[in-house]
Amino acid sequence: MADLHVTILLIEHNMRVVMEVSDRVTVLADVGERAQEIDVQRAERAKQRAEQRLAQAPQPHLSQGDLDIERARIALLKALVRLNVASRARTRA
């Protein structure tokens, strides 16, 4: 696509499709960061903190959807995604 000098606004969740037609991707979100700018050490620390909070949670609360547990789960997922994106960006660079 780069040789065509075309800009496309594509709203798609299937990343395989996005990567097939793109040589550059910008993600619009409430919160976002460029893959190359992800602080891997910070994301790793966030992952470890979330894992620790989840490990310390009493098991009965897991089935009750406790708010703190849900926040820890979301923090863990966010950290894992950031680490995955950073890793991919660095292998392509």
Image (cartoon, rainbow, N blue to C red):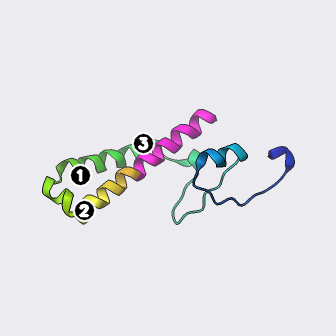
Measured from the top left, where is residue 67 in percent x and y? Answer: 25, 65
What numbered label is drawn on residue 68? 2
**In front: label 2 or label 3:** 2
Measured from the top left, where is residue 73 in percent x and y? Answer: 31, 54
* Secondary structure mostly seen in the magenta stretch: helix
Q: Which residue is mark 1?
A: 53
The local secondary structure at tag 1 comes to: helix
Q: Which residue is mark 3?
A: 41
Measured from the top left, where is residue 75 in percent x and y? Answer: 36, 55
Residue type (three-letter) at the residue carrying disc 3 = Gln
The local secondary structure at tag 2 comes to: helix
Q: Can I make out residue 22 in this image? A: no
Compared to residue 59, the image places residue 48 above or below, namely: above
The magenta stretch is 78-93
Measured from the top left, where is residue 81 in percent x and y? Answer: 46, 48
**In front: label 1 or label 3:** 1
Distance from label 1 to label 3 (Cα)?
Answer: 18 Å
Distance from label 2 to label 1 (Cα)?
Answer: 9 Å
